[in-house]
Image: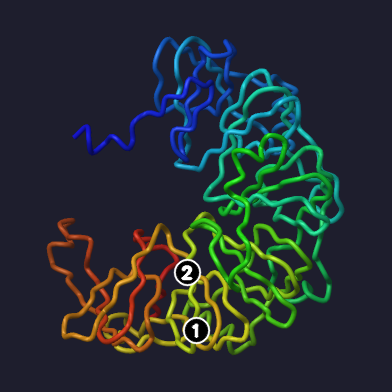
Amino acid sequence: MAAALEQYRETPTGQRWTQQNRKMVRVDLGIGDQPVLARQGSMVLYQGKVDFSYKGAGFAGRVVGNATGQEMQLMRCTGKGQVFLAEDSTMLHPIELQGDAVCVSAENVLAFDESLTYEVRRIEGHGIPGGALFTMQFQGTGTIVVKTHGTPVVLPVTPTTFADCNAVVAWSAAAQVVVSSQVRMRRNSYAGDTGESVNLQFRERPATSSSSSRTRSEGEPDMNQPLAGYAPAPVTARMENHGNHMLKVAMQTGNDLLARVGSMVAYEGFIQYEPNPPAVRQIAKDWLTGEGAPLMKCSGDGLLYLADYGANVVVINLNGDGISVNATNLLAFDAHLSWGVERVKGLAKFAGQGLWNTRISGQGWVALTSRGKPIVVDCGGGEDETYVDPDALVAWSPNLKVKGKRSFKAQSLIGRGSGEAYQMAFSGQGIVVVQPSEDSTDRLRVRG
């Protein structure tokens, strides 16, 4: 048993802060002899004589925190020993400050040395509800641990570096931050919205970063050393992954993109977003089938980064082929591809009036999302069928034959069912994409 678990053994370094893996850090309170402030409830393990106490912000601090949304619920860790910290399996990034400063949203702070000073900083800007955005600024000598939902991207600050205000995590305090608004009466006076009305533009100084869960970003000082591995790789294709949870798209004028509304986390260059309002017939069809996906049109030149709340991103190059995909799993695709909502044949009895899905075909790129790393199953051409739970199904080849299978039994009515009452059976030549999550909310839509 010890040999099988050896790869998970604690990593000793003799340093004050040690990253055990991407989602857990250890702090040795005996090194440096100073307390650590950490998010309440973030301790998962400790060794030695360690005391945990409440760290209050004071009356004035609580008023400012509530008013700005930057209140931190902290605990004070003191004593001699090692404390292991983690929270909700988020990715952790220790950043060492050496007299410099970094701006971090309060919700992305896991822990930091008490020697660091911190205060709420206001970002002025026009067109923001309430008149401004707020963040926390940390300064001094010490370490701060920042958390992200998924793999972040670290971008150098240029005059054309932008990030979604809901996806930015942190940035160098020396960088100038201004608000960029793409609200236009011509584009927003009718139904439909891009979800990208207010962005942050960064000027001067190095490095900013955005997280793939649409809540974050990271920047310079000595931050570049631990975050260097998250810098974007050179462009090699129209669409490619940045880590497992983010999509990078090389945008060119005349080669537009349709993407899920609000999925932009950052971009470099000159890119515009417009809502893609459907026709009246399409609105009625979406209502009847439940398969409509809110899309925005992206156009311009530069690099565009998209994500969907930390979901895994799967990139597919359609070479004249087609794919049938759940609208909830559709992240982005080339605007010139043919697409539409279609009824899945062979499931009329299974789903009352039928089951609907989105079909995309042509020559171009498509990006899908999956809750966890998916598996692609080759159905083959034999007589054996491939059965899939509808709640775990992401996409499949449209040429496959599909039918429903019921395994419902009367004992399910008294709470003795298997939880697997329905499956979808696939046969023929093609593939099926399945995610390791049976999310029964807002997935395959049944109307009847």
Instruction: Say which element carries label 1.
Output: strand
Q: Which residue appears at 57% of the width and 19% of the height?
A: 36
Whether residue 391 is visible to the viewer of this picture, yes or no, is: no
Q: What numbered label is drawn on residue 48?
A: none
Q: CA distance from mark 1 to mark 2?
A: 13 Å
Mark 1 or mark 2: which comes first in sequence? 2
Q: Which residue is mark 1?
A: 360
Left or right of 68, for residue 159: right
Percent across and percent down for residue 398 are 38, 86
Q: Which residue appears at 58% of the width and 15% of the height?
A: 35
Quarter of the image with the C terminus is bottom left
Left or right of 46, for residue 69: right
Q: Which residue is mark 2?
A: 329
Residue 74 lies, with reference to residue 373, above or below; the image says above
Percent across and percent down for residue 272 are 76, 70
Please state which amino acid type lies under the numbered disc 2.
Asn
Q: Which residue appears at 63% of the width and 38% of the height?
A: 225
Q: Looking at the image, which is closer to me, 69 or 240? A: 240
* Residue 187 position by quadrant: bottom right
Left or right of 175, for residue 234: left
* Residue 342 position by quadrant: bottom left
- Image colouring: rainbow
Circles 1 and 2, Cβ within 8 Å, touching? The answer is: no
Mark 2 closeness class: few <14, some 14–19, many ≥20 residues within 10 Å? many
* Residue 404 position by quadrant: bottom left
Please state which amino acid type lies under the numbered disc 1.
Ile
Mark 1 closeness class: few <14, some 14–19, many ≥20 residues within 10 Å? many
Left or right of 282, for residue 288: left
Percent across and percent down for residue 163 are 71, 55
Q: Looking at the image, which is closer to me, 251 or 287? A: 251
Percent across and percent down for residue 351 are 32, 80
Instruction: Say which element carries label 2.
Output: helix
